[in-house]
Image: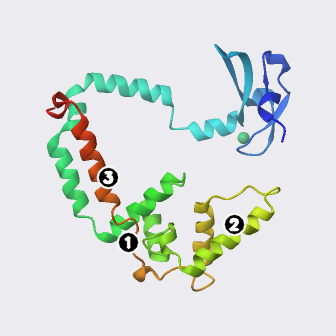
Amino acid sequence: MPNLRSKFKTDRFDQLPLSRTCNKCGKDKMRDEMIIQHRHDDSGNYYYFRPRCKDCNNSAERGHRREYKTKYLQNWRKQNAEVNESYWRNDETREAAKVRARSFSQDHKDAIAIQRRLYNRGEQVTIAAARELLALYGRCYPTRYGLTLKGLKRCEQIRSRLRSRSEKYRMLSSFEIRVMVYEESEEEVGLVIPPEQQPIPYPKAAENLRNFHQRKNAEKPPQEVSL
Ligand SMILES: [Zn+2]
């Protein structure tokens, strides 16, 4: 496997290759259509391609101008110190949020849990979409706890099939394989435990998190706790 990075990295701008494939849209782009970064620090002085074209970068960053946002937020927080403080440390606000969260139905909580699990794997879904997934695949989606023995075996089958072709294909993560099996369950019965019979996944997770925060707060010096 050639080291792509070194091919696109050089100490002189005019030695950079004239074109590069964008990893995002897959098109071959000219040098001036790609994002090029100049690094000049202890690690050396060199130019290199970001594996993204300017078009793709702009469309991904639209609405997320980070520098602008940071400065704007910093100024806003300085000028509105009192309001800002209330968002962070106001006990009433925090208590109200807790009460509101307690009033959520179990279905809503399950949907939030599904949304969070997907978010942790880089998939963003709306709460409405998470509710659809909940209705379709049950509260364990996309963990292994919602799969039957047959479903778990199917995961292993997919994994070993991919392993024998691993020269050609990227190995999928267990998460991606499980999502495939959940999707397969729409056509084949017996892979997923029926939603109403699924166990509660990670039943101790909330308790563990609470304990973790209690332990963390106990370690803090007393002045900070009194705030
Ligand atoms: Zn692109």
- In the rendered structure, the answer to whether residue 118 lies left or right of residue 157 reads left
Tell me the residue at 50%/36% (across/down).
64
Please identify the quadrant where the C terminus is shown: top left
In the rendered structure, the answer to whether residue 201 lies left or right of residue 94 reads right
Q: Is residue 113 above or below residue 25?
A: below
Q: CA distance from mark 3 to mark 2?
A: 32 Å
Asked if disc 2 is less than 8 Å from ligand 1, the answer is no
Q: Earlier in the sequence, mark 1 or mark 3?
A: 1
Q: Position of residue 78 (x, y in %)?
A: 29, 22
Q: Secondary structure at mark 1?
A: loop
Observer-nearest of 150 and 21: 150
- Residue 40, compared with residue 208, is above or below; it is above
Residue at image mark 2: 159
- Disc 2 or 1, which lies upstream in sequence? 2
Instruction: Judge the density around disc 2: few (<14), some (14-19), many (≥20) Cα neighbours within 10 Å.
Output: some
The numbered disc on residue 224 is none
Q: Position of residue 199 (x, y in %)?
A: 40, 76
* CA distance for labels 2 and 1: 26 Å
Residue 55: percent from left, percent from top: 68, 37
Residue 104 location, quadrant? bottom left
Q: Give the left or right position of residue 168, taking residue 119 as reference.
A: right
- Residue, disc 1: 200
Q: Name the foreground residue: 127 vs 122.
A: 122
Choose top left, top right, bottom left or bottom right for residue 32: top right
Q: Which mark is residue 209?
A: 3
**Mark 1: few/some/many CA within 10 Å (<14, 14-19, 20+):** few
**What amino acid is labelled 2 in the image?**
Arg
- Kindly identify the amino acid type of the residue bearing the numbered disc 1: Ile
